[in-house]
Image (cartoon, grey):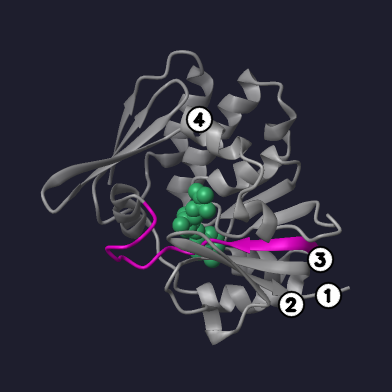
Amino acid sequence: MIKIANHCHYHKKYARELIERIKSYDSDEEFLIQIEDDSLALCCQIQNQKTCFSHSLTDPKLLKRASQKNQLLLKACNNKKREIHSIIDLTAGWGRDSFILATHGQHITMVEQNSLIFNSLNFLLKIVKHDNPDEVYKRLQLINDDSVEFLSTRDIGFADCLYLDPMFPAHKSSARPGKELQILQLLTNNLNVEELFEIALEKAKYRVVVKRPIHAKTLSDKKPDIVYKEKTIRFDVYLTNNF
Ligand SMILES: C[S@@+](CC[C@H](N)C(=O)[O-])C[C@H]1O[C@@H](n2cnc3c(N)ncnc32)[C@H](O)[C@@H]1O
């Protein structure tokens, strides 16, 4: 069940659209979604405590992070010849990784299977696209689908790079903030992540990139060709060369 609090004054049309789309969202948990002018907060009760996660594509912290040129996400998602121009983010989530990649010129198709997350991100994207003529946002496209379905049924040709950031297992040393992880775990799961990974390897032109917690095992126990390590996460890169 979902409860909605609408505090959006500037983009009433988009807020109404969002409400229409999520009002019958079916879930065992009770969620509260608070719609603000340029952000959303998603709240629920976890272990008798109100737990909220707030997200915005104009969050100064995200913009600062996105502006950094030397981050490993960018290295992982391109090659030395800079041949990678189009990326499909197969696990879009809140769209932050895609936004960072788009900031540095990549054209991103984001695929998200959960309708509440998809509609929330779609709302935030519409707002920033409306308010901001910046080309970055035009490079982001969002699709509501299961990525296994998407890759199996749509004629996408070969995308230069396929990107996966599956849900991190719940763990004390997780790089993801606790509240976000807890809410994501209630909303979604990764049942088909290895199946998705196997299809991605067949469909990527140059590479598949998988974001993992630093000590997690590799997907399908497959050894990556390149690994970029940060403190708490790593990017496993699989070179595909499918032409
Ligand atoms: C950890 S989040 C991704 C976070 C994202 N990288 C970001 O920067 O905000 C994982 C997301 O992948 C989605 N997901 C998992 N399996 C999927 C699938 N087969 N197709 C599409 N989305 C999927 C989940 O619903 C969840 O929203």
The image's mark for residue 158 is 3
Q: Residues within 10 Å of mark 2 (few under 14, many from 20)?
A: some
Query: Would you name the residue on which mark 2 appears?
Result: 202
> Which quadrant is the C terminus positioned in?
bottom right
Mark 1: secondary structure? loop
Alpha carbons under labels 1 and 3: distance apart:
8 Å
The label on residue 242 is 1
Query: With 16 as the anchor, is 152 left or right in this view?
Result: right
Q: Is residue 220 above or below residue 105?
A: below
Q: Are marks 1 and 3 in contact (CB under 8 Å)?
A: yes
Crowd tier of the residue under label 3, counting other residues whose Cα lies within 10 Å: few below 14, some 14–19, many 20 or above = some
Is residue 241 in the magenta section?
Answer: no
> What secondary structure is marked by label 3?
loop
- Amino acid identity at mark 1: Asn
For mark 4, what is the residue? 17
Q: Earlier in the sequence, mark 1 or mark 3?
A: 3
Q: Earlier in the sequence, mark 3 or mark 2?
A: 3
Mark 2 residue type: Glu
N-term mark: 4 or 2: 4
